Image (cartoon, helix red, strand yellow):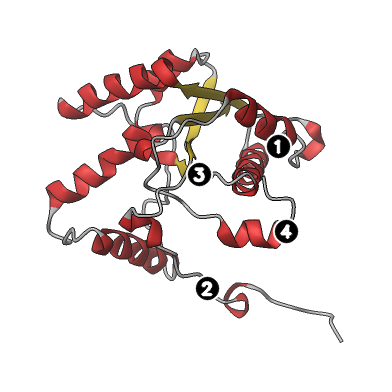
Amino acid sequence: MTDTMSVSEAVDKRMSVRGFLPKPVSYETVREILDIARRAPSGGNVQPWEVHVLAGDALDALKAEVAEKIKGGQREGNQYDIYPPKLWEPHRSYRFKCGEDLYALIDVARDDKMGRLMQYAENYKCFGAPVEMFFSLNRNFGPPQWSDMGMLMQTIMLLAVERGLDTCPQESWSDFPDTVAKHCGLADDVILFSGMALGYRDPDHPLNSLRTDRAGVDDFVTFKGFE
């Protein structure tokens, strides 16, 4: 861990890493991150989150089963819409450019459907990360509790950066809610929200050079009442 890293530095350094080194992360480190992250904001202190952490043989078994399903062309279907059905501007363009920039780094053309599918399938290999976290919550919780989950995940990601680790939040795992539920022991009244790969960044992986463009402050903020 770096004692001198500020919150600002951790926020700036955090990114979605899509290539990890085959270097293990200790149970103690993962537990420490989660122990601190439980102080993340939660409206009314409801603490709606459930987290399941898989590594080693447990993670390998999940990845193997999902790989077989993908090979057979199977998808279990999302339990929620990751994006609105008709995403509007400028958000549609933000998303489109992110995808185009990502595939350009690995020379996958827009009409190369197989190449894009193969890269997307890397999600279910956790991009080589040795640890995968799964975030779920009761189906009766609403948008405020979903926002609590997002704050927990952000806290985990920043704590990982502080410790020299990296992450990739993966809503793509919601394509296989039944399989994840089986391997994690999720109850029927729980909905899978997202996965998160955790590990050490591969500095030589081309996708790890991607830094997504972000709108400027004046594009999304309105200030009033300041002198």
Element at label 1: helix
Residue that numbered label 4 is attached to: 6
Amino acid type of the residue tagged 3 in the rendering: Thr
Question: Marks 1 and 4: CB-CB under 8 Å?
Answer: no
As displayed, is residue 167 above or below residue 137? below
Q: Which mark is residue 37?
A: 1
Which callout, 4 or 3, points to the residue nearer the camera? 4
Amino acid type of the residue tagged 2 in the rendering: Ala
Amino acid type of the residue tagged 1 in the rendering: Ala
Measure the C-alpha gap from mark 4 to mark 3: 18 Å
Q: Which mark is residue 215?
A: 2
Which callout, 2 or 4, points to the residue nearer the camera? 4
Tell me which label, 2 or 4, sits earlier in the chain.
4
- Residue drawn 24% across and 26% down? 67
Amino acid type of the residue tagged 4 in the rendering: Ser
Tell me which label, 2 or 3, sits earlier in the chain.
3
Packing grade of label 1 (10 A; few <14, some 14-19, many >=20) is: some
Question: Marks 4 and 3: CB-CB under 8 Å?
Answer: no
Residue found farthest to the bottom: 227
Which callout, 2 or 3, points to the residue nearer the camera? 3
- Residue drawn 72% across and 58% down? 6
Packing grade of label 2 (10 A; few <14, some 14-19, many >=20) is: few
Element at label 3: strand
Is 162 on the left-hand or right-hand side of 13?
A: right
Res. 166 in view = yes
Residue that numbered label 3 is attached to: 167
Tell me which label, 1 or 4, sits earlier in the chain.
4
